[in-house]
Amino acid sequence: MINEAELITLAIQARENAYAPYSHFQVGAALLTKKGEIYTGCNVENAAYSPCNCAERTAVFKAVSEGKREFQQIAVVGGAEGKELGFCPPCGVCRQVLREFVNEKVFQVIVAKSEKEYKKYTLEELLPQSFGPEHLSL
Ligand code: THU
């Protein structure tokens, strides 16, 4: 089974593919399924701006589009092009997208500057009192 440092390394590698010619802010993510598979993603920007997609959502959509819906952890790294990585917590939209598929009390978000320097949160800490699929049947 992959460890946290290895998941961060994969996020750092995924960031190399970031397409961010407008913000020059490059993000990478590595999403771990409960079975141990990994789906990586980077941010993909667009000249029309609003179609920009974050690294985390790229990873989630890759996984879901391949039939994977059970996740345990995601590692996220980000920083301005050519500069050192800074802590890059997932945006609100990505938090909500993750919330769709996970138990927010259990799922972990690793926000990393490096394999050695990172913070770990549950999704619930990042998105308290959240709205999820179960609310639609209340
Ligand atoms: N971005 C991500 O990919 N993930 C985040 O969690 C925060 C922001 C991207 C979106 C955009 O391409 C760039 O970073 C600047 O906001």
Image (cartoon, rainbow, N blue to C red):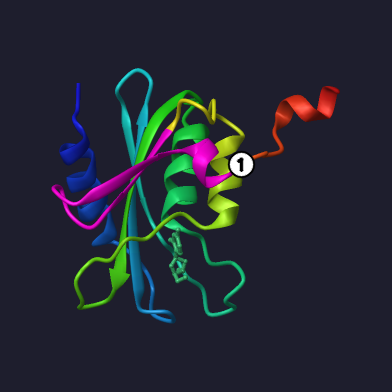
**Would you identify the image quadrant in which residue 3 lies?**
top left
Mark 1 CB within 8 Å of ligand 1: no
Magenta segment: does it hold 112? yes
Asked if residue 134 lies left or right of residue 109, the reply is: right
Q: Is residue 128 above or below residue 73?
A: below
Magenta segment: does it hold 118? yes
Q: Residue at x 28, y 61 (%)?
A: 17
Farthest left residue?
116
Figure disc tally: 1
- 85 or 28: nearer the eye? 85
Q: Is residue 93 above or below residue 70?
A: below
Magenta residues, as a range? 108-127
Amino acid carrying label 1: it is: Pro
Q: Is residue 99 above or below residue 116?
A: above
In the rendered image, residue 120, in percent from the top left (x then y), is placed at 33, 41
- 134 or 119: nearer the eye? 119
Asked if residue 135 lies left or right of residue 34, the reply is: right
In the rendered image, residue 12, in percent from the top left (x then y), is placed at 22, 54
In the picture, the quarter occupied by the C terminus is top right
Residue labelled with disc 1 = 128
